[in-house]
Every structure is written in C-alpha cells, then in structure tokens.
Image: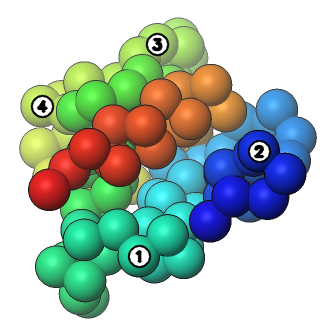
C-alpha cells in the first residue's frame, strides 16, 4: 500500500507527465488491485473500461478536437473511449487529476 508515507500512486506515476486515458485506467486498475480495494474484485474483466469512464465523469480528461485543445465531457464520447467517432483525439490525464481520481476511488464502496 504505502511506502514511506507515499501511496501506491507515487510508485506507479513518478513523473508529472500526462498519461493517455488508457494508461491512466491501467494504472488505476493496478493500484486498486494492489491496495485490495473492494471495487477491484467487483469489476472483473470490465475494470479498464469502468476506470476510463469513471475518470471521464470525475476528473478533467484533456483532448483535442478540430485542432483545439479542451476538456472532454463523458457524454460527448457516448461510450467511444478512444474518442474516434466523436472527433476527440489524444485523450490524456494529468498527474494531479489522477491523484484526485485515486482519492475518490478509495471512497467507492
């Protein structure tokens, strides 16, 4: 769980570079499993998709559409997590937002 006062996220995401939504969801899955969070056992094979959708609903996820950068709303993607059909590209999560997501995630169930 925690090493020298730092949570698992400190081990998983050591730099402050943004991650793709998919990478962030994978890291969230790994952390939920490592910390034995109840949600990890509940989700099973849908965990990656669930985390990606939850991030879109709870934290700012950035992307570009029509050459302009912006924050993506979950409703705009309509289940298309790659963003291809909706025109969104390069969906990314910032480190600070990811940490906020983990704090929220630890309160689920």
Q: Earlier in the sequence, mark 3 or mark 1?
A: 1
Callout 3: SS: strand
The image quarter in which residue 57 lies: top left
Callout 1: SS: loop
Instruction: Give the CA distance from mark 4 to mark 2.
Output: 37 Å
Mark nearest the camera among 4 and 1 is 1
Residue 29 showing in the rendered view = no
Residue that extends furthest to the front in the rendered view of this protein: 4
Instruction: Give the CA distance from mark 4 to mark 1.
Output: 30 Å
In percent of width and height, residue 59 lies at: 38, 26
Res 5 label: 2
Q: Nearer the viewer, residue 35 or 87?
A: 35
Q: Nearer the viewer, residue 45 or 100?
A: 100
Res 70 label: 3
Q: Earlier in the sequence, mark 2 or mark 1?
A: 2
Instruction: Give the CA distance from mark 3 to mark 1.
Output: 34 Å
Q: Earlier in the sequence, mark 3 or mark 2?
A: 2
Instruction: Give the CA distance from mark 4 to mark 3.
Output: 14 Å
Which residue is found at the position 20% from the left and 77% from the top?
A: 43
**What is the image's colouring?**
rainbow
Q: Give the side of residue 64 with respect to residue 57, left or right.
A: right
Mark nearest the camera among 3 and 1 is 1
Callout 4: SS: helix
Task: Give the residue pinned by disc 4.
Answer: 75
Q: Earlier in the sequence, mark 4 or mark 2?
A: 2
In percent of width and height, residue 89 lies at: 49, 38
Task: Give the residue pinned by disc 1.
Answer: 36
Q: Earlier in the sequence, mark 4 or mark 3?
A: 3
In percent of width and height, residue 9 lies at: 66, 51
């Amino acid at each position: 769980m925690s090493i020298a006062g730092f949570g698992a996220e400190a081990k998983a995401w050591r730099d402050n570079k943004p991650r793709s939504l998919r990478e962030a969801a994978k890291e969230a899955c790994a952390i939920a499993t490592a910390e034995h969070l109840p949600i990890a056992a509940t989700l099973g094979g849908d965990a990656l998709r669930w985390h990606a959708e939850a991030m879109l609903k709870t934290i700012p996820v950035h992307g570009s559409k029509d050459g302009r950068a912006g924050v993506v709303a979950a409703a705009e993607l309509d289940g298309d997590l790659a963003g291809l059909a909706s025109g969104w590209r390069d969906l990314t999560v910032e480190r600070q937002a990811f940490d906020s997501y983990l704090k929220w995630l630890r309160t689920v169930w």
